[in-house]
Image (spheres, rainbow, N blue to C red):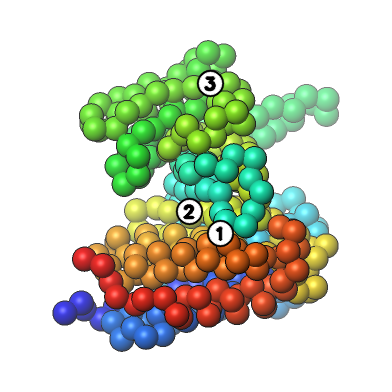
Amino acid sequence: MTPRLQLRIGVLPGDGIGPEIVPAAEIIIDAALAARSDVEITWQRLSIGHDAISKYGTPIPSATLEVLDELDAWILGPHDSASYPDPWRTQLTPGGTIRKRFGLFANIRPARALPGTTPVSPKMDLVVVRENTEGFYADRNMHAGSGEFMPTPDVAMAVGVVTRQACERIAHEAFRLARTRRRRVTIAHKANVLPMTMGLFLDTCLEVAEQYPDVTVDHQHIDALAALLVRHGDAFDVIVTENMFGDILSDLTGELAGSIGNAPSLNTSETKAMAQAAHGAAPDIAGLGIANPTAVILSSAMLLRCLGARHDHAVLSHTANKIETAVETVMGQGICTADLGGTASTARFVDAVVESVTCSSDRVQS
């Protein structure tokens, strides 16, 4: 008999369309698990962003972080930090603070064409594995202070950080993931012009590759790879790369696969996991009831699959599959939001996914 699993998952709605789309993931997970007695999820709603500023005077209050310390996983909505009042507008974003505090070093971003969409690359099915703690991003590459500075008012400089330890652990993530897919890893780099930083990244990934002889490995310069993705996006399986390159490539592959509005994302460490859609807060459509919840729903399915592996609990992985299949079924029926050319409201789309996931088989495959 499968042991009963009790989980507490945080819910941080965030800004803009976040309060409309993040609860959708909660509703759909509850519906998918409604018939199960071996999994119980308790949702812990927490405040970030504008809501937290109004309540606590800061977009990422210590009370929220202290609760996250006690949780294994959470769903993070988008933040609209550009609209925060000073001094918060120019400080580390809520998402950046959470990533840094919990060492969420791996950002897993799938890109797969979904039914009912009009993708540039209709056969694309790949995953960008992005190192999430170093590189040129100033909010992530320093223990204290900033990676950007101005020695004079007319000169701006940035420090890029690459360490062997971070390269090794993200490479292992990529190769382990490839073993569950088509067993191919492409290393994206720019070692020809950044021979020390990107050279260390490339060399370390190739060293790790020797531990996975069953996985085919190649490497591409980032600019050449971007062009190849447009022309032959279906030729790639797992792409591993550093922080900024991964950010850019995953937005590109999301659009090539149909829309970044459908692009899911999971941030993980060895002990914590955070589902977070790849898109932004879209404040211009907030409150209109037309936001596309697909990305956060699929991100939450990724979260369940991650938790299933960590707790050795097949029900969670099975539930993730049910949710992904339900989303594909609904979109294949032409039920989608306006950004994808449809007429469905957010609520109508969520209701359709709930109906589909409720009607699907609940038998866990061995």
Q: Name the quarter where the N terminus is drawn.
A: bottom left
Q: Name the quarter where the C terminus is drawn.
A: bottom left
Q: Position of residue 206 (x, y in %)?
A: 34, 24
Residue type (three-letter) at the residue carrying disc 3: His
Residue type (three-letter) at the residue carrying disc 1: Gln
Q: Position of residue 22 (x, y in %)?
A: 60, 71
Between the residue at mark 3 and the residue at mark 1, the CA separation in whole angstroms equals 28 Å
Check disc 1 and report the residue beneath it. Answer: 276
The numbered disc on residue 221 is: 3
Question: Quadrant location of residue 116?
Answer: bottom right
Residue type (three-letter) at the residue carrying disc 2: Asn
Q: Residue at horizontal 24%, vertical 32%? A: 214
Q: Earlier in the sequence, mark 2 or mark 3?
A: 3
Q: Is residue 100 visible?
A: no
Q: Earlier in the sequence, mark 1 or mark 2?
A: 2
The numbered disc on residue 267 is: 2
Q: State the SS at label 2.
A: strand
Closer to us: 143 or 355: 355
Badges 1 and 2: C-beta atoms under 8 Å apart?
Answer: yes
Q: State the SS at label 3.
A: strand
Question: Quadrant location of residue 250?
Answer: top right
Against 319, residue 265 (above or below) is above
Closer to us: 297 or 173: 297
Q: Position of residue 282 (x, y in %)?
A: 76, 60
Mark 3 residue crowding within 10 angstroms, few (<14) / some (14–19) / many (20+): some
Q: Position of residue 24 (x, y in %)?
A: 59, 74
Q: Residue at horizontal 31%, vertical 47%? A: 180
Against 231, residue 279 (above or below) is below
The numbered disc on residue 26 is: none
